[in-house]
Image (cartoon, rainbow, N blue to C red):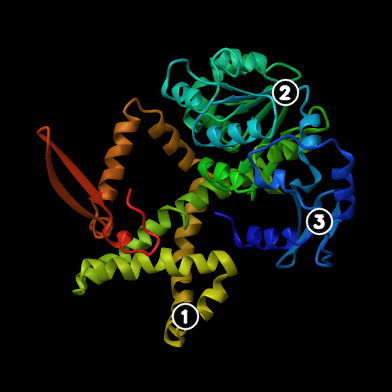
Amino acid sequence: MASFAARSASQVLRASRRTSAAVARAALKPQAASYSLLARTASAKVILNPTFQTVRGVKTLDFAGTKETVYERADWPLAKLQDYFKNDTLALIGYGSQGHGQGLNARDNGLNVIVGVREGGESWKQAVEDGWVPGETLFPIKEAIHKGTIIMNLLSDAAQSQTWPELAPLITPGKTLYFSHGFSVVYKEDTKVVPPKDVDVILVAPKGSGRTVRTLFKEGRGINSSIAVWQDVTGKAKEKAIAIGVGIGSGYMYETTFQKEVYSDLYGERGVLMGGIQGLFLAQYQVLRKNGHSPSEAFNETVEEATQSLYPLIGQKGMDYMYNACSTTARRGALDWAPIFEKANVPIFEKLYESVRNGTETRKSLEYNSRTTYRQDLAKELAEIDNQEIWRAGMYKVSRLLWDISMTSVFTGKVVRSLRPDYKPE
């Protein structure tokens, strides 16, 4: 999810479009059709804002006293982007969440994209359903790497490690090696992924799932992404990363390093983005239940109000805005208890960050995700979460027997969620 800084940058950057950029757009040939609404309706409006400096689509923003450089797609209109990559073939290796989103966006932006996956596998079938044509834009992995000039390794972290001995010899001079996660090369002692010394190695890491990458692109908005350079052989690695970032659907890009990207990513996922929030939800719910509150009341006070009422306000206008939108009693209690939660949780987060930095989290991930029983083991763990009372409280199961040609149909609905004004039956 986008950080407060990212949100602030988005608000500031959306308020500006330089006159020179508008002139450049007008001078270039008409843009090709794209799925992106923004690409089809690019605006030449100019709104001056003194809070940042601009250089050809590059913005220097002040984030709470720290100046950072942000790159935006305004400097890469579609015609320029297509011309930049006119001699390149983007070979997308892997067609999971990121592969799907990035590949379709780049294709819709008119770039030459091919997909490389195991022939006949589930990813192959999915790619065919999405319009990739076997023998034309869809190939076995090794053939795709041979044909590509920019090799976008979007396999899972575990799969990158497992396949690297076979793929490494195919990354020949003149090609560019691309990642969307710093995992494999930063933890090379564990993954054994060591890029060749004679190729550019770059990273574009969208700050969201592949599904979000695709959805925001189709809406014309664009996702925030990090960019980084591991190895610059040509002297153009960063420029290439920025351009590909635009090509795969990024709206704004922030420069980082491979190491910082993977540290913050693993840390965030295990913290407030996923692991921490599940732990806090569960702890609060359990205490409410032990003190006699009903499942529906405990769920509403823990999950429903948070996700449907309060968290959206934080995302839209910040924590202080959310506090101000609540009652005086709620505000006082939150202000009093926030420092207590902070003090209690800092040691946990420090322990988590060290576990990421020293590679413990990496080794756990590689071991678990490399098991032959990975999918079954994962399904079992997720089923355990699904069966926790907190999540069952948000669901109801209604079985209706429809005697039609002696068949029984079972319909499942979501209790609390079914009561929302915007609920649509599945």
Among numbered discs 1 and 3, the one appearing first in the sequence: 3
Check the image and name the residue furthest to the front: 404
- Amino acid marked by disc 2: Lys
Q: Can see residue 162? A: yes
Q: How crowded is mark 1: few (under 14 residues within 10 Å), some or many (20 or more)?
A: few
- Amino acid marked by disc 3: Arg
Q: Position of residue 135 (x, y in %)?
A: 57, 12
* Nearer to me, 272 or 208: 208
The local secondary structure at tag 3 comes to: loop
Q: Where is residue 107 in the image (x, y as percent from the top left)?
A: 64, 30
Q: Where is residue 34 in the image (x, y as percent from the top left)?
A: 67, 37
The local secondary structure at tag 1 comes to: loop
* Nearer to me, 168 or 393: 393
* Nearer to me, 420 or 308: 420
User: Number of callouts in the render?
Assistant: 3
Q: On residue 197, which mark appears?
A: 2
Q: Of discs 2 and 1, which sits in the foreground?
A: 1
The local secondary structure at tag 2 comes to: loop
The residue indicated by pointer 3 is: 17
Is 218 above or below relative to 102?
Answer: below
Q: Are marks 2 and 1 in contact (CB under 8 Å)?
A: no
Q: How far apart are marks 3 and 2 (CA)?
A: 39 Å
Image point (29%, 50%), residue name: 385
Q: Of discs 3 and 2, which sits in the foreground?
A: 3
The residue indicated by pointer 1 is: 326
Q: Position of residue 363 (x, y in %)?
A: 45, 36
Q: How crowded is mark 3: few (under 14 residues within 10 Å), some or many (20 or more)?
A: many
Q: How far apart are marks 1 and 3 (CA)?
A: 36 Å
Among numbered discs 2 and 1, the one appearing first in the sequence: 2
